[in-house]
Image (cartoon, coloured by chain):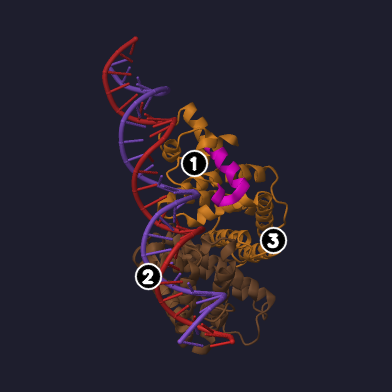
Chain colours: A brown, B orange, C red, D purple
Amino acid sequence: MTAEVKAVTTSASPPLTERQEARRRRILHASAQLASRGGFDAVQMREVAEAAGVALGTLYRYFPSKVHLLVATMQDQLQHMHTTLRKRPPAGDDPAARVAETLMRAFRALQREPQLADAMVRALTFADRSVSPEVDTVSRLTTAIILDAMGLEKPPTAEQLSAVRVIEHTWHSALITWLSGRASIAQVKIDIETVCRLIDLTSPEKA
Amino acid sequence: MTAEVKAVTTSASPPLTERQEARRRRILHASAQLASRGGFDAVQMREVAEAAGVALGTLYRYFPSKVHLLVATMQDQLQHMHTTLRKRPPAGDDPAARVAETLMRAFRALQREPQLADAMVRALTFADRSVSPEVDTVSRLTTAIILDAMGLEKPPTAEQLSAVRVIEHTWHSALITWLSGRASIAQVKIDIETVCRLIDLTSPEKA
DNA sequence: GCATAATGTAGAACAAGTTTCAGACTTGAT
DNA sequence: ATCAAGTCTGAAACTTGTTCTACATTATGC
């Protein structure tokens, strides 16, 4: 279980030495720490570097921009969440209910660290083309979590994958409206439940 | 038709003199111009001020941040689009098809100015709480466009409004994936069509 | 018309993300 | 053990969003 997670961490690129792995970890830790305090704005590159005990130039060698750093931080947090969620799979009867339950669980986790959520989600949606590979990794992780929650026996159909894409869209955008204070927690819940109905609509038995 | 649009432009706040209205318009024009060239990054406050022929301090009096400026720019563009769309309403048979058609039309309009779209959408999703009112206005405009496209005879049900919210979420998020090069135009089309199926699911006759 | 408050201007100053560079330290191959 | 290549450090410089200041212009109530 842990082994697989490791494999996803970062594909390709030359393997890091132990000291480098440790530096990378300190940086990500500092980033999450500062983000938890004051959100996106509180993650200041100079402060991250100092808190992690590396020079500013080194920080930029590991993460070529603030957005890269925060997206990597999100990757990191998502992996934790994925393994946590796997330990207690959702209990709903149908796939739609299970996905909704899983996403609401993730949402409650984010509510415990709203500032961290702010930093990560804002970075994710602000990311431009230069961050595409990293954002894609996050997206694949999210997809994996949702597919896991669906608990399908067979591989998903193209239609089901489309539904999952739309669920992801809704998830991200609903989070943003919540983080910027334009939607309540209750509203996000409704949005998630609404979009999850697409799963029933695309389940093979239906048609 | 034009009268109503005027009313939405900016609610409350003291009425502007003619010269002020003209300044505001020059600023928005400069903003859109620069955005069309190089997207979000190309909209530099000093350049906007110069192109609009106002002092930097004045620009900040009219729009308290770059994000405010770009969200206002989006408001402006959306209003154009709304009136344009109204002239030729979508022709589909059911509400879902009409909404999908309308959004695809809007999407094609954005494709003609991808850099401008980039600037506006990035600003919209990056906006923090201080921009909530303005972002909300954009959101209401978008909702209005979608409801228009549905062409309902009766006022929408709560369920239908939920569906519209989810459609909006998908619309924004799909745009972002397209703008950051992570999804093709075809993929966005599929996502829009997929989410629009929610409309059938929530139409009163169904239940 | 005039006093005055609000608005606009030019330009300096400040903050935080990013780049650059010279020199010290590690690492890996020989 | 040693040399070359690559990495890290510290510090300064540069960019662009934002704020501030001193002064000029405009609008408004009397």
Residue A46 seen from this side: yes
Taking the image as shown, residue A140 lies to the left or right of residue B59, namely right
Residue B116 seen from this side: no
SS assignment at label 2: loop
Provide the residue span drawn in magenta: B27-42
Chain letter belonging to callout 3: B
Residue A97 locus on image (x, y percent): 52, 78
Relative to the observer, which residue lies in front, A36 or B45? B45
Q: Are marks 3 and 1 on the same chain?
A: yes
Which residue: 43% across, 36% down?
Answer: B58
Residue A39's place in the image compared with C8, above or below, is: below
Magenta span includes A180: no
Residue A116's place in the image compared with B94, above or below, is: below
Chain letter belonging to callout 1: B
Q: Label 2, label 1: how many angstroms apart (C-alpha)?
A: 37 Å
Residue at label 1? B46
- Which secondary structure is most common in the magenta stretch? helix
Chain letter belonging to callout 2: A
Taking the image as shown, residue B43 lies to the left or right of residue A23, namely right
Residue at label 3? B185
Residue at label 2? A113
Please name which of the two marks, 3 or 1, marks the residue nearer to the observer: 1
Which residue: 59% across, 64% down?
Answer: B202
